[in-house]
Image (cartoon, coloured by chain):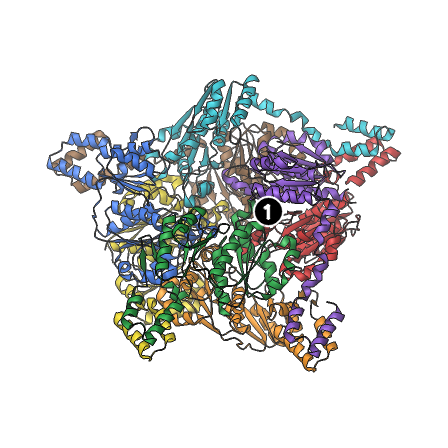
Chain colours: A cyan, B brown, C purple, D red, E green, F orange, G blue, H yellow
Amino acid sequence: MDKTQLAALLQQVADGTVSVGDAVLQLKMQPIKEVDEYAKVDLHRGIRQGVSEVIYGAGKSKEQIRGIAQAMLDDGQKTVLVTRMSAEAAAYVGETLPLAYHELAQTGVIGEAPVPNCSGKIVVATGGTSDIPVAEEAAITAEVLGNPVVRLYDVGVSGIHRLLSHMDAIMEARVIVAAAGMEGALPSVIGGLADCPVIAVPTSVGYGASLNGIAALLSMLNSCASGVSVVNIDNGFGAGYMASMINHIGG
Amino acid sequence: MDKTQLAALLQQVADGTVSVGDAVLQLKMQPIKEVDEYAKVDLHRGIRQGVSEVIYGAGKSKEQIRGIAQAMLDDGQKTVLVTRMSAEAAAYVGETLPLAYHELAQTGVIGEAPVPNCSGKIVVATGGTSDIPVAEEAAITAEVLGNPVVRLYDVGVSGIHRLLSHMDAIMEARVIVAAAGMEGALPSVIGGLADCPVIAVPTSVGYGASLNGIAALLSMLNSCASGVSVVNIDNGFGAGYMASMINHIGG
Amino acid sequence: MDKTQLAALLQQVADGTVSVGDAVLQLKMQPIKEVDEYAKVDLHRGIRQGVSEVIYGAGKSKEQIRGIAQAMLDDGQKTVLVTRMSAEAAAYVGETLPLAYHELAQTGVIGEAPVPNCSGKIVVATGGTSDIPVAEEAAITAEVLGNPVVRLYDVGVSGIHRLLSHMDAIMEARVIVAAAGMEGALPSVIGGLADCPVIAVPTSVGYGASLNGIAALLSMLNSCASGVSVVNIDNGFGAGYMASMINHIGG
Amino acid sequence: MDKTQLAALLQQVADGTVSVGDAVLQLKMQPIKEVDEYAKVDLHRGIRQGVSEVIYGAGKSKEQIRGIAQAMLDDGQKTVLVTRMSAEAAAYVGETLPLAYHELAQTGVIGEAPVPNCSGKIVVATGGTSDIPVAEEAAITAEVLGNPVVRLYDVGVSGIHRLLSHMDAIMEARVIVAAAGMEGALPSVIGGLADCPVIAVPTSVGYGASLNGIAALLSMLNSCASGVSVVNIDNGFGAGYMASMINHIGG
Amino acid sequence: MDKTQLAALLQQVADGTVSVGDAVLQLKMQPIKEVDEYAKVDLHRGIRQGVSEVIYGAGKSKEQIRGIAQAMLDDGQKTVLVTRMSAEAAAYVGETLPLAYHELAQTGVIGEAPVPNCSGKIVVATGGTSDIPVAEEAAITAEVLGNPVVRLYDVGVSGIHRLLSHMDAIMEARVIVAAAGMEGALPSVIGGLADCPVIAVPTSVGYGASLNGIAALLSMLNSCASGVSVVNIDNGFGAGYMASMINHIGG
Amino acid sequence: MDKTQLAALLQQVADGTVSVGDAVLQLKMQPIKEVDEYAKVDLHRGIRQGVSEVIYGAGKSKEQIRGIAQAMLDDGQKTVLVTRMSAEAAAYVGETLPLAYHELAQTGVIGEAPVPNCSGKIVVATGGTSDIPVAEEAAITAEVLGNPVVRLYDVGVSGIHRLLSHMDAIMEARVIVAAAGMEGALPSVIGGLADCPVIAVPTSVGYGASLNGIAALLSMLNSCASGVSVVNIDNGFGAGYMASMINHIGG
Amino acid sequence: MDKTQLAALLQQVADGTVSVGDAVLQLKMQPIKEVDEYAKVDLHRGIRQGVSEVIYGAGKSKEQIRGIAQAMLDDGQKTVLVTRMSAEAAAYVGETLPLAYHELAQTGVIGEAPVPNCSGKIVVATGGTSDIPVAEEAAITAEVLGNPVVRLYDVGVSGIHRLLSHMDAIMEARVIVAAAGMEGALPSVIGGLADCPVIAVPTSVGYGASLNGIAALLSMLNSCASGVSVVNIDNGFGAGYMASMINHIGG
Amino acid sequence: MDKTQLAALLQQVADGTVSVGDAVLQLKMQPIKEVDEYAKVDLHRGIRQGVSEVIYGAGKSKEQIRGIAQAMLDDGQKTVLVTRMSAEAAAYVGETLPLAYHELAQTGVIGEAPVPNCSGKIVVATGGTSDIPVAEEAAITAEVLGNPVVRLYDVGVSGIHRLLSHMDAIMEARVIVAAAGMEGALPSVIGGLADCPVIAVPTSVGYGASLNGIAALLSMLNSCASGVSVVNIDNGFGAGYMASMINHIGG
């Protein structure tokens, strides 16, 4: 409600054509109305960033996943990413839709295979082999969003020479996703070696005092290296999405 | 140790000029030696990123801070950032060194005032007025590292229209730092509005079930918005540094 | 025991017709006896508030649920609400009793369909679609207790314009139930927009650092908005019951 | 400007005693007002939420508190509530402003003494004498917001007859605020006796396994009584505010 | 061999009906006896602690339980208590040994039915019906150890009059076991009413913020009533054993 | 007025040395008595629970402690126990009242020195010397309540022979209070040696992973010995009170 | 290739029985070897850490385990230890490889049976019978690594005489591994008796407040005995490995 | 009690010279008596290991420390170690006793300076400079116990080349103590590099999510490197003692 509209309303009150009560109600709702011009902002997001639509498969039936994906494709979406997708759901969806399913990562890509639209590289690293499913969720997410991805798996800190033998990849990355469970030290070591942002992903790999990933999470939040930020435990998608957002800043 | 060197060593063993024990020792240390070429990498970091040196003031005496800063300036550093610096230490350091001290943020900038060297803008936002000290640490860090910074303070989610009245700044940002204590919801709301990376900083503002910032931390890690990652509680410096790293990707 | 009765007892002691030991025992129990007049208070509650009886189905066998419900109906109860009721139990109970079963909410309504007996509206809102089962438990509870209910689902804070597009419903509500998992920010945002009480329900939706709903719970307890109070994780029934109690104050 | 003041202004417009132009000017000045750069006092909230503004004193200097309060009074606010106000700040503010200070509750009321504007009674109960400061914050908040308040202190569950001797007050209440530390059982017992909403306030009273109020908080969240909801530890203000909101529904 | 049996043996030596040599042999066989290599049944404890041995069934196979029980009976034990015993194990053991199995309590009594050997009464009370399995473990344990037991089930604090209607039993008890989940307030209320020791047993009954019994445990540890001590969550056996030990002090 | 005093009064009535009217008057004065408005001293508890009243000194001013104690003595109480009493408060109270102050235990005994009224012995044991303040609170409480007390200090499990050298005391005890911080293993070891109830008191002695006594608390709750129950961290009073209650069962 | 094998190879070079070229080839093949793409078996560790490789079976398929083991044997490894190996995997691996499987410990030894190569003894002790699986993992690990092992099972602190009857073994040990769940007191008691290093292993044995081994873990970290250090919950392998490392220092 | 003694006792029972009751009592105490021969074992410990006496200074007054130390020296002790000793206590003790005080480590050495009595070296490493006080406590403890110590400070994982430049020291160590706060990754990296036991010491260095050292503690317990065990947070003494015990195994 701009000044003219406000004056008009008050004039109506003065004229008696709008009651005091109605005017009170209209004025109470003003501060909110101003956001209307941004309401369609999420339609713009897709256009500006080229982000594909994503379906979070956990808790959805295979019928729901297929239904949502079909609707997206019908709407003109070229590629649809499905995370936390069971093999059973994949089999079902794959019957009628073009699906590339990555069982280890429990991730499916429906529609056209993504192609890189960005020059920078994202390195996705893991501490151990058990962290690979989470890392693959990040890597596939990043690929679907148009990023070239380099994988460095099983380079954990208890065998530091394995990590050090990949210094070239680390120094060339524009963003690094580092996934680790147990003591979660990988992002700190990488953060000290690299000069690019590191997205740390704690994984629930471990037992006992790993507390389902809390130990790794705390470790990463307390990283003594600068340039490290953290996402939720096992949130490979979130890390891949964040890394892609950062990578696209560089074009 | 390349193949030639290895062969030479073994030849010495065969010749009896190197004992078996010495050869075992030399071989045990091999995988590590290969990293030597990267050992001076951190000297390069300063050159490549233009990052100023930082002194973490907590737990250091005023004499230590002045001594370290003086040494850095003598070494040719133009600007030195000091975080967690008490007013008392600032008074002492300011006696002999050119210091701009920000009491609210407990942060000092020694030497030349920084100038922006990067085109993108970093927005630093807070939920309440009590979060401002942490946000200022982030903002000053980002400024010292060459970033233009826009401050949006006290735009917390319980008065959402205050945040919405700043949509222009949010849409124009290249990176956003969002600091909040208590329920820590600000990064989620901003993450849903913006299409750029959001660095979430939980603050220890609150009482009771805020658990000194743990409530805000957990809230941010569980953000339902994509493109949000998190640093440690009250880690304004870490957020500002990460934001700067991301912002400089865009030049 | 009033003064006369006490004197009578002591006279019996003086007379030797009551032993000292028996008198000690009787006096020890006095402060409690005074509550006897309130002992049947819960019979009055049903009359005064028109609250239907509720069966908490978790941990009860289908035979137990049917037996209890039958007894309540025989006792004159018109409507019986069953929460945490499995589909299997519903099928069994439905064989002999008139049951409307809501599978998503795991909730059954036995007997007459409830009709509103109260003028105010209760809004039940959720952050995401995964929170709907908990919200439905709240909504059905409120309906069974005689409240008109307006549902606003999937209006979470990462897409704030979805929530803002329902400002009319929010401003007209007499009480609002806001259910959310993950970061649990919805009640804070609604609490800042509305001028009525908000009952916050954390849900166990999420993974990793959501700690089965603890993150959302802490977030809600720390809400920076006034007029927000919280019930247990996934306690849709408790929220619906509390909302109904408040709504009926307004008649 | 609260709802009543807004209606009054509009009535003046309707009556012709205030011109449309003047009304536009007054309303446009409202939304966000800077006060001495340290706090955006959100005067618009009075309209949206229908209550007077409150100053949360913790972390604010005595000068800040006086400045904000003065601005509010200048703006036409009749009564200003200050919570978490130190005796020292009270002495300072009281020099220039009419202040009634409650030291036990660390709460001050500036301006006109509040008068009840609502027929229902709010009972504020505590488990022990150590919980009284939190309870008083709730009680004074409720009084400032226009509610008649009945205090029942030190009626904890280990001496249940003390509570039972006040059954009249409990049965007559329209809303009850129950504050307790240690085992936090009071709200459950009251919730089972009363047929009105109970707002539970855990306090940090206790030691060892009370975990600064976490034990009481968990106890209250798990209350087996219906009609109980919970606010943050030691959040007397929040409980009093919520209780007032509920009480005013009944007029 | 418990204290009574030892005294009997020694009496036989004193009487001359058992020779010194035979008694030496019997006693030397006692201390530590291997049973099928999987458990050292510490038969000497009966002497030192004055009670019969108990088999903790959790984690033991049905064959192991039968083997250990058989060895105990062969050794002269009249009654053997088995806790955490599955229905399947009970069926197996019952094939060859005289077993009374209590399915709700998952508890079996092998051998002679116990008879009270003590004049005081133990009251076992629960907050709700879901706490009964734990309470029954306590009650049966106490009965096997020779105590008269009075059960007061479903007398939780949200319906305090139910508890108060049993004041006679509470005032006459020599020890009380109070089991409750959720908010765990029952022991505090009973502790305030009774003048005998109260053993509090938190149960894992509840959901969400009950944290599998931690909420009830903390509540009980913080009881504001004196004369309350606490055992582990769901530890009905421990409570019954402790109560029996206390009760036997009074003969 | 405790049970003995009540019986004495009634005996006087039975004897005719006190009139019925006077007895009525005395009893009617009992139930709830206001003391200087800051505490309802529940004098009726003495009757119901059979013990003298105790003043919990923490959080009370020295004036409050003296006022409450004076009122109790005026009311006929022979001995008053004050726990958590500072040396400063003790000095103040000692000016006007007969006080024996135990600084280590922060405990004061006002009025007549207690004499044993019970045949059984209570052993109070500690793991280390740092646990003695808590143990002394327990020991003095037990002595005030009429129990003979045997102290076994610094007999922790890392020097098990020190404990074993006191087997006589352990075997003769009717109840044992075992206080320990750090790993809290003492009650388990004693519980395995003794055949009487053991009240375990975790202390906050320790650092780091002792978590202010939580480690010891958890250890004690998980004791593998039967006949062990637990009170709150540092709750020496609670342990002494519970032990006395148990000890008096045996007369 | 472990240290011994490396020395042997070099000796052969020194002796002239292996040519320098062949030795180069063998060493160059060592560092990082891909096995079927699912694991980089770090064969170089054998050199650096002086021990044989171990396969952590959890999360690996039976095909993966067999593949990795086969590669190790092909590489010259004489004995391969597999931890957390299911009976099903053991059956599968045993079809083609020489496997000794210990079902209780879920541990397999492939290849040659290990023989002691060290003079000192490692004692492995447990508190209860339920801790034996973890202890066996430690014992078998130590045996595979060449240590003589003495087992002392079910010697927990609630029956301290059982432990004391094995003082000879305790005094003769060079290292002791002490595994215990529940209250976790065993390492403290042993640490006080022995004069050698004690490796404490908390186990997840217990329920309720044992928090899946956290109680035992905290207890052990707070041990009042010197010479005790701790590994992760249920980490029998880690304890056995650490004990072996220490034991071999003594030759 | 051997067989002869037992027979003698029983004969006395048969003869009537010992009552049945007395015999029961004597038999109940048997299993314990057997440990008497080990009771003086801790006197032997000092002899065998050459361990100096240690005074834990926390919670002791300066007078107590001086008194205990004086007594030890009088008893013939050559060197006394005092940990957690304030500068004030050091000044006081130094007045009358020969004291070398290390302020950073809050540690004092009274009497003769220790000399190495052992050939192996202990490396003490820290992640940062703030960890040095804890590390110094470990180093001085080890030195007092006769070990040569090599210090590697500020070699944390965010600057991994600093650590790698000290590979010689790491490879030559017989035991390593690794102290680190924040993310606590140092022991994992060192454990992967070294082939000797690593004692990990979490420190309370850090803020926010470091939770006073809990983050580092969990990280170390979850170390993916073998040969790492952990002591309590900030327990430098415990680490130094454990390291010395291990080091002396090698002579």
The answer to whether residue E102 is left or right of residue H222 is: right
Name above or below for residue G111 compared with residue D188: above
The reply to whether residue H203 is in sight is yes
The residue nearer to you, when weighing C17 against A76, is C17
The reply to whether residue D67 is in sight is no
Name the residue at the left extreme: G16
Chain letter of the residue carrying label 1: B
What amino acid type is highlighted by mark number 1? Gly
The answer to whether residue A97 is left or right of residue A161 is: right
Q: Quadrant of residue G29?
A: top left
Quarter of the N terminus of chain D within the rendering: top right
Question: How far from the left and from the top, in percent, is residue A26?
Answer: 77, 31
Neighbours of disc 1 within 10 Å: few (<14), some (14-19), many (20+)? many
Question: How far from the left and from the top, in percent, is residue C164?
Answer: 67, 31
The residue nearer to you, when weighing B211 against C151, is C151
User: Which structural element holds mark 1?
Assistant: loop
Quarter of the C terminus of chain D within the rendering: top right
Question: How far from the left and from the top, in percent, is residue G36?
Answer: 31, 28
At x 58%, y 78%, the residue is: F112
The residue nearer to you, when weighing C75 against F115, is C75
Q: Quadrant of residue G55?
A: top left
Mark 1 lies on residue: B206
The answer to whether residue H168 is left or right of residue F155 is: left
Across the whole image, how many numbered discs are drawn on residues? 1
Name above or below for residue F175 compared with residue G80: below
The residue nearer to you, when weighing B71 against F216, is F216
Question: How far from the left and from the top, in percent, is residue E242?
Answer: 48, 62
